[in-house]
Image (cartoon, grey):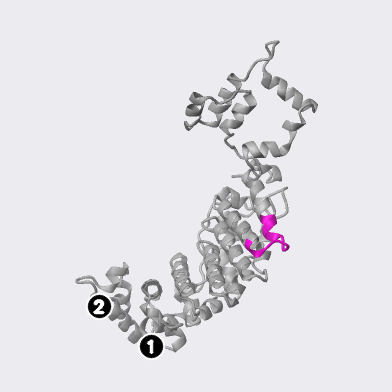
Amino acid sequence: MGRSSLSEPTESHVVLEQARTPSKLSLLYLSGREPNSSTRITMANNRTADQLLKWGLQNAPANPDGTSSVTSVTEDVAAGRRPDLADPGLYDAIMGKSEAQMMQEELSVAMDTSRTVEDRCTALDNFEMLIEQVDNANNMEPMRMWPAVLSLLRAPEPAIQLAAAWVVGTAVQNNDKAQAVALRHGVLAPLMQLHLSPYADVRSKGVYALSAMLRHYPAAVAQFAASGGWAVIERSLYDDSLNVRRKLVFLLNSLLLQDPNDPAHGIVAMPEQKQEPVYIQGRSDAPYEETRATLDANAHPNVAAAMIENRMHETLLASLLGTGTVAAEMCGSVRVRDDEDFFEKAAQTIVTLVAKLQHMASLPQDKLEALLRVLEAPVDGAQTRAQQAGIDVTPLRTYLGI
């Protein structure tokens, strides 16, 4: 689509007043009629807003001169003779607030440090539910909400940090427009800092938001890699929270799968994608000329090579086989390989890595053979552990020449 065919993304483009169904009782009240028993039965039916509006207009009582009472009330309100009906609060009470208005109010509460932490977290939870709707998530930029949300990732209260990370993750999940906006606002730095939190729930939610930012978005992966992100993941593979480790190995496997690089040949260009222009934050006069593919830097960092360089494969194999340090093998009092969810995710990540490295001798063959024996061991009768977990061990067997 050409630039000239796009309208400016001004505040008016945000849908501040969405279609809302009026209260059935409010329509009866405005028409001057009391709901009798048969009307209540009719009201119980699932009617559309248009049907209800037509009913209210058709049943509005006429003035003595035959004119519509609705017209008279409208004229009275315009002339200031009905201040009771001109109250903005009345409209909100009858029709309800727009979702954009609710977003503004909830974020305002979340930013108010005079409120209790519980109130602010409740507000962020409500905000998160609103932005589950992708249009609301995309409206965060023209409504200038991203700086406020990202500032809460650095709040002194762990509960606020957690709730803010949840908001970020929901906003950017499977939403390339929100990913591009969040990246320009510098979302990665505060998210990466959350791995230092002494609270496991905060670290876990930070990984959730980070995963939502990196998956299917090469530009974010590139910035993450340039900011020391691989070292952050490597350290976090020793986290004392199993939930954090599970999410990290899932993220690694996802990044391996989306990476088009051949590990033996560095970084390759991503195929050009035709995307809508992305708008510059704070400007409503023109979009970027570049497409998303251009903004994505046209390249995906080499995930397999980064894993080898940071020895993540060694940590994962030690966790799976119990052959490494106590920090790798144990998570508190739990042996990580005994956690079925972690084992399946970590084993799948190793298999995906091996598939990427099939022409390179970078992995310890003895440990891969040990892992293959574990995966091919029978459990529950005829099924192997790999079959039970849905893991195809063919890449392992091919790599080992079996």
Residue kind at label 2, given as amino acid type: Ala
Q: Is residue 147 magenta?
A: no
Report which residue position mark 1 lands on. Answer: 323
For the point 37% across and 75% down, the residue is 358
Q: Is residue 110 magenta?
A: yes
> Which image quadrant: the N terminus?
top right
Where disc 1 sits, the SS reads loop
Q: Residues within 10 Å of mark 1 (few under 14, many from 20)?
A: some
Please provide percent x and percent y for residue 371. Answer: 32, 80
Where disc 2 sits, the SS reads loop
Q: Is residue 189 above or below residue 146?
A: below
Residue 188 in sight in this render: no
When asked about the image quadrant of residue 221, the answer is bottom right
Residue kind at label 1, given as amino acid type: Thr
When asked about the image quadrant of residue 386, the answer is bottom left
Please provide percent x and percent y for residue 252. Answer: 46, 71
| Residue 247 - label | none
Please provide percent x and percent y for residue 39. Answer: 51, 25
Q: Which residues are magenta?
A: 107-118
Who is closer to the viewer here, 20 or 269? 20
In the image, taking residue 332 as reference, residue 71 lies left or right, namely right
Point out the residue furthest to the right here. 80
